[in-house]
Image (cartoon, grey):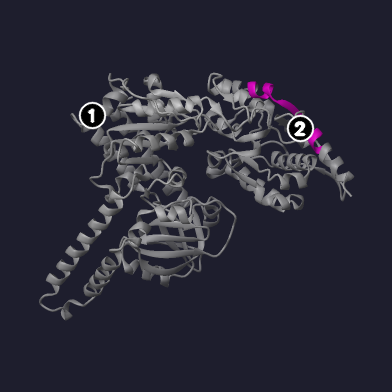
Amino acid sequence: MTLSEQQRLLRIEYEYEKSEFRRETELFGIGRKVKRGECWYPVAAGKTYYNALNRLAIEVMRSEDLDIEHAFEYGKRVAFFSKDATDHLHYFSFTATVSYVQEERMVVLLDAEEQAALLHQADHLGVQLSFDETTYHLMFDALARAINDKDGRLAAFRQLFYGSAKPQFSSSHIAPRLPWLNRSQEEAVDKVLRAKDVMIVHGPPGTGKTTTLVEAICEVLRREPQVMVCAQSNTAVDWISEQLSDRGIAVLRIGNPTRVTDKMLHNTYERRFEDHPDYSQLWAIRRTLRQMLSIPRRSRDSKHHQKVARLRERADELEIRIRQSLFDNSRVIACTLAGSAQATLMGWKCHTLFVDEAAQALEAACWIALPKCHRVIFAGDHCQLPPTVKSPQALRAGLGTSLMERIVEKHPAAVHLLTTQYRMNQELMRFPSSWFYKGQLKAAPEVSHRSIFDELDSALIWIESADSVSATMQDASSPAETLPSHMEEFVAGTFGRINKGEAQLTLRALLAYTQRVGLERLLSERVDIGIISPYRAQVQYLRRLIKAERALRPLRTAITINTVDAFQGQERDIIMVSMVRANEKGEIGFLRDLRRMNVAITRARSKLILIGHAETLCKHTFYDKLHAHCKVVQAADILSAHSSQNTSTP
């Protein structure tokens, strides 16, 4: 693989995603897009205003709460449309950029007041995600710079990642004493401080990667005036920014946060800009400028042009002064990898760049931020979620291999593995440690024997769904009920697969276990529960089932149901995984990507319940080994246990 090959594969991905977007836009109706979380309809256009950075913004509100996870977030491009009486969609000729999203309200940035007027006049207005070419262009430009750099820092990184150069570490160094960290974490911080060009903190689930990274940043800031912290997603940037802010470090968040808290908003560039003492003067000048520019040409006096020029010059001076003040008073500049290319950061550089969740970032995205630094510290876990690549051709050719993973393979001496994990008990940890981490993980003493029910309660269970089609359950108030077929069904589009019988079985297993432990105990001890499925259709079906179950209403706030990707970085006391795939051919689709399954099976603190069709899944060695490692329970046993508990309940 070369950087030129990266360019070629990125071009394939770009063309594939663009063509898929066009195809889906033409093929899918509005209802389908809404369910996929890619569209809000209907919406109402609210107030229009200029934000602190002098960008025209408009509020958009949706009137229906559909309890659907949406994909709108800061920086994404959106398109507006209206729907006529014959249900035809009419798209507006402009696109906009998301600035802020919170529940049923979104703020988007427009280019002209005429666009806002069109939205206010439109009937039956809707907004959907648009194909975003901006990030692709940033990645193409970044790769071109990396290829063409002759003797600068990018050329040095290129030699490290693709050539014969090797990472260098300082030997004359006094290691910091950090007794609140475990030994592997302390050694990781020490290695960060000694790294001269590149280093990787490899953090398996529950090993305190964020804690280690925060300590490393704090130690680096004892030696350097500023650092940059990036990640692929806004959520990841927000999380580490919040941890650093809690330590009293001045963080300047470039780009609006996904985690909308007062603390996070206060750290944003826009809010800090607005709070600066000189902002009121700048705002007054901008208002005067807008008023002068709105004067018709025939009504302007002879000095109009000079007045406008002087006002613009004064506004530019004030804006530069405010910006410089914000940067001078910040120790950490935090943004997404793509956000590092913003005009706000033009010309700004630091010695050290930290890239969190680096294993989830396309290599080209990392090259966007690399020109900002002299050395880079990657943190993440290449044994968990990989970068998202939609083109099968590009994926097969290696576009899904992250820069972090490439460095792990090429320079293992630059990698430090965190080995003590604080999430899973010993029984839950044993299999992922053996399969993914060469058995190097160990459970911290305080969690090694943790359980929900009692020590005799198996922490790791596989419920076999194969016999659920013929299993029955006797409810106290209803006749015997036969569950739907346990075989999977295909759902068009990226929803993938659904298995209604397995979803029903998941519900029955949850009811049986919560009744066994006791509702009062679950509530008093604040036990939280996560239900995961690799397929979005199954997630939505499970949400409907569990929302309709009266017995689970007291636990509603304690239960989270989502996809594997959405659970990355999270943990729960109890995790249930509905694996969906059940067919005669033994096809398991993207369950072959074991990194996703690693995420799913390492979210639980105390108990993991897998629901799956062993006959289909165990044709793959990984699932066969996992199945052998679990206590296997038949669906009929779960249903009969739930039935007897219902019968005995007065």
Q: Bin the neighbour count of mark 2 within 10 Å (Cα to Cα): few under 14, some 14-19, many 20 and up.
A: few
> Does residue 34 sit above or below 305 in this rendering?
above
- 326 horizontally vs 314: left or right: right
Query: Magenta includes 632?
Result: yes
Residue sitting at 13 percent across and 79 percent down?
301
Q: Secondary structure at mark 1?
A: helix
Query: Which image quadrant for residue 219?
Result: top left
Nearer to me, 506 or 32: 506
Over which residues does the magenta segment extend?
625-639
Q: Which residue is mark 2?
A: 454
> Does residue 599 sit above or below 343 in this rendering?
above
> Does residue 193 sit above or below 578 in this rendering?
above
Q: Amino acid at mark 1?
A: Ala
Residue sitting at 47 percent across and 36 percent down?
210
Q: Which residue is at the far bottom?
A: 299
Q: Is residue 343 visible?
A: yes
Nearer to me, 60 or 488: 60
Q: Which residue is mark 1?
A: 155
Question: In terms of secondary structure, what is the magenta stretch mainly?
Answer: helix
Q: Secondary structure at mark 2?
A: loop
Q: Bin the neighbour count of mark 1 within 10 Å (Cα to Cα): few under 14, some 14-19, many 20 and up.
A: some
Residue sitting at 84 percent across and 37 percent down?
640
